[in-house]
Amino acid sequence: AAGVIQSPRHLIKEKRETATLKCYPIPRHDTVYWYQQGPGQDPQFLISFYEKMQSDKGSIPDRFSAQQFSDYHSELNMSSLELGDSALYFCASSIRGQGRYEQYFGPGTRLTVT
Amino acid sequence: AQSVTQLDSHVSVSEGTPVLLRCNYSSSYSPSLFWYVQHPNKGLQLLLKYTSAATLVKGINGFEAEFKKSETSFHLTKPSAHMSDAAEYFCVVSDRGAGNMLTFGGGTRLMVKP
């Protein structure tokens, strides 16, 4: 079965650079969620999109922005990167329109800021 | 507001013995509850989910969990641990008041001794 695809899987950036993470949800899933998992931490919700509109916002820094496109893929844009942004970034998708709440996670993108 | 508390940060069992990972939740609405597993350097895999149907939920790999509203608990169990069960386990809550966003517990690292 198709799963959530994230790219790239690994990314190394320097401080003050920008990064773009991409997420391709499971086909027919209408909702995308972004989570940040710092070293030794549990995942923290950043932001979600339902039918290409921002749905909920969590602890996403103002330096980050995201959007969902017409093909339902989503991109997380991160600017002015800081050392503390080094983390594993997960994307998840679900079929919210059908009232199904389970989220299926991608393998994550490991971002290292040096 | 919703929250999750995993009562043990580390649990160590011997192979072939039972596993119990404890989780208590708080939710303003009727919650959906999940257990996810994360193997080292891997993504999050859904083990099982509770969404207001049967209170005893069976998941993959022989795991099950029981929703107890009176105790606000959703403990994860397995009759016999296998070496491959060694991983980080997250108890997760989602309620409609939070727009289906997931709130993770702090995680429990399960170690399995031979």
Image (tube, grey):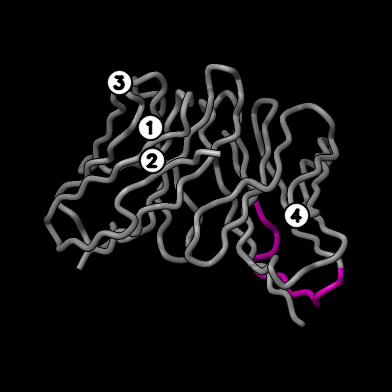
Q: Residue at x 53, y 22 (%)?
A: A96
- Residue farthest to the front? A1
Residues at circles 2 and 1 in contact by the CB criterion of under 8 Å: yes
The residue pinned by badge 4 equals B61
Tell me the amino acid under the disc marked 1.
Lys
> Which one is in front in this view, the residue at disc 2 or the one at disc 4?
4
Label 3 marks a residue whose chain is A
Please state which of the two labelled residues, at mark 3 or mark 2, is closer to the viewer: 3
- Mark 1 is surrounded, within 10 Å at the Cα level, by few (under 14), some (14 to 19) or many (20 or more) other residues, namely some
The answer to which quarter of the image holds residue B6 is bottom right
Q: Give the range drawn in magenta.
A: B5-17
Disc with the residue nearer the chain's start (3 vs 2):
2
Are dots 2 and 4 in contact, CB under 8 Å?
A: no
Amino acid carrying label 3: it is: Ser
Residue drawn at 74 percent across, 80 percent down: B113
Residue A89 lies, with reference to residue B52, above or below; the image says below
Q: Residue tagged by mark 2?
A: A46
* Residue B78, x across and y down, in percent: 82, 58
User: Which residue in the structure is indicated by mark 1?
Assistant: A57
